[in-house]
């Protein structure tokens, strides 16, 4: 019986065929094993690259100037690695504080927590530790050498003044200033460091733009002219080499918003036929106008630093409804998230700073970022609470300002670090 042709294969050919088949099978098995491995490696690399790229993109979207103004050399020394000084955590610092309420005369009662009996002291004994590097402690001698023959102004509300007072206290180890204010109004102060020929000033402008205490409509609400300069400070800045601009909690008030002198909306006004906007709306436009005012000053040649929003920490109620801040230690990084209205305020600032920075390039003006928001979000323990005294109110707890000495001193660590990089 004949076998079907093609089923019978000579032994030599069969061996050769099996050898080829085994070789192919081996190659296939190797490919099956190796390809997924390469995919995993590539995926991990791509994921890492994508994550890093995503972070950089997000960073750039927030502010093109952050990379230039917030990075410092990593702990690797000469490695050239950079790290973001505004991203980190609070770690114990037994060496702090670097001044006391008895060694610094400029501390107001409102922030003089030790004078008014705060029983704990741990809130003074922390320092900000960026991920991947160290933020040097404030060096008063180095700061005064950098600003020798120059001038600096803090523009904003009482929290901005809070930072200026912290700076004066930190510098007190080297030199005390003379009060050379041209007015008796404590909201507009000017100090002179004679030895270093350095002038330090503060300009009170809680809204940064023109405002009127009582709106012309006859309501008791304050009116903001969101497109008009507050000339109490904008006409005074030409001589200054550094401006630190900030603003915040005043924008949570009931406000009437005006543009071209006409009412365009409000915040929590409950006025019929008037659009009620979130606080970030007026906040954004106020910073836009403030930066426009700076850019309009032909004689101003200085550097502008935006110090970002500093969150309050009222718990158990609003500031006027029994709210308080009684925590005794910082939050861990995963215990607090910037969200809601605070996130809206923060984003508005950053976006307006980015726009101003672009316009500033055309004039050769520098705009820089002091991003204090994340660090201060983690410090519910640093406020005066009931251990401070408001000028006219002893019933409300203060969870907006900061004890001196305290976590606000870190803002001047940030400032000096940025100034050294210029």
Image: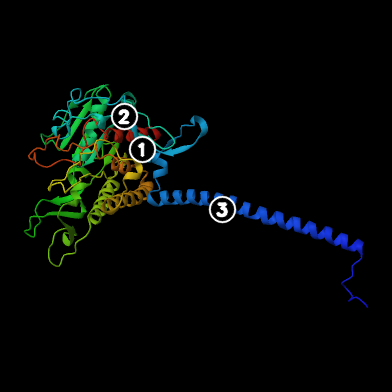
Q: Earlier in the sequence, mark 1 or mark 3?
A: 3
Q: Position of residue 273 (x, y in %)?
A: 15, 67
Which one is in front, 398 or 156? 398
Q: Earlier in the sequence, mark 2 or mark 3?
A: 3
The residue identified by callout 3 is: 43
Q: Nearer the viewer, mark 2 or mark 1?
A: 1
Q: Position of residue 33 (x, y in %)?
A: 67, 54
| Circle 1 Cα neighbour tier, 10 Å, few/some/many (<14 / 14–19 / ≥20) | some
The residue identified by callout 2 is: 147
Which one is in front, 234 or 266? 266
Q: Is residue 367 visible?
A: no
Q: Position of residue 392 (x, y in %)?
A: 7, 39
Looking at the image, which residue is at 85% across and 62% down? 17
Position of 231 relative to 192 (above/below): below
Q: Earlier in the sequence, mark 2 or mark 1?
A: 1
The residue identified by callout 1 is: 89
Instruction: Give the left or right position of residue 216, taking residue 421 as reference.
Output: left
Which one is in front, 412 or 50? 50
Q: Position of residue 316 (x, y in %)?
A: 18, 47
Q: Is residue 322 visible?
A: yes
* Real-space Cα separation, disc 2 to disc 1, in angstroms: 29 Å
For the N terminus, the image quarter is bottom right
């Amino acid at each position: 019986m004949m076998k079907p042709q093609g089923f019978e294969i000579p032994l030599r050919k069969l061996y050769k065929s099996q050898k080829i088949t085994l070789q192919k099978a081996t190659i296939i098995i190797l490919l099956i094993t190796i390809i997924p491995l390469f995919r995993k490696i590539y995926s991990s690399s791509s994921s890492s690259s994508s994550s890093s790229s995503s972070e950089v993109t997000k960073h750039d979207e927030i502010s093109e100037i952050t990379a230039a103004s917030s990075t410092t050399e990593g702990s690797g020394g000469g490695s050239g690695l950079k790290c973001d000084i505004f991203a980190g955590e609070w770690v114990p610092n037994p060496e702090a504080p670097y001044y006391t309420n008895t060694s610094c005369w400029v501390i107001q009662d409102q922030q003089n927590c030790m004078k008014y009996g705060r029983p704990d002291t741990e809130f003074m004994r922390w320092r900000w530790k960026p991920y991947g590097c160290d933020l040097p402690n404030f060096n008063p001698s180095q700061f005064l050498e950098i600003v020798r023959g120059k001038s600096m102004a803090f523009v904003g509300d009482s929290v901005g003044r809070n930072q200026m007072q912290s700076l004066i206290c930190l510098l007190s180890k080297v030199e005390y200033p003379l009060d050379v204010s041209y007015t008796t109004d404590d909201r507009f102060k000017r100090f002179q460091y004679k030895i270093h020929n350095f002038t330090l000033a503060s300009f009170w402008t809680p809204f940064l733009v023109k405002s009127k205490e009582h709106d012309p409509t006859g309501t008791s609400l304050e009116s903001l002219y969101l497109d008009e300069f507050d000339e109490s400070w904008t006409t005074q800045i030409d001589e200054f080499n550094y401006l630190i601009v900030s603003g915040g909690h005043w924008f949570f008030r009931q406000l009437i918003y005006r543009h071209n002198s006409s009412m365009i909306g409000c915040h929590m006004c409950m006025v019929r036929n008037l659009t009620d906007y979130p606080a970030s709306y007026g906040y954004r436009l106020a910073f836009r106008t403030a930066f426009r005012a700076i850019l309009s000053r032909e004689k101003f040649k200085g550097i502008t630093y935006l110090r970002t929003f500093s969150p309050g920490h009222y718990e158990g109620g609003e500031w006027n409804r029994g709210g308080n801040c009684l925590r005794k230690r910082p939050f861990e990084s995963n215990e607090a998230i910037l969200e809601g209205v605070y996130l809206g305020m923060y984003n508005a600032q950053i976006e307006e700073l980015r726009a101003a920075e672009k316009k500033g390039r055309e004039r050769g003006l520098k705009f820089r970022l002091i991003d204090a928001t994340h660090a201060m979000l983690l410090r519910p323990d640093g406020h005066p609470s009931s251990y401070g005294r408001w000028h006219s109110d002893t019933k409300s707890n203060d969870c907006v300002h900061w004890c001196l000495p305290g976590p606000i001193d870190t803002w001047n660590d940030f400032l000096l670090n940025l100034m050294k990089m210029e």
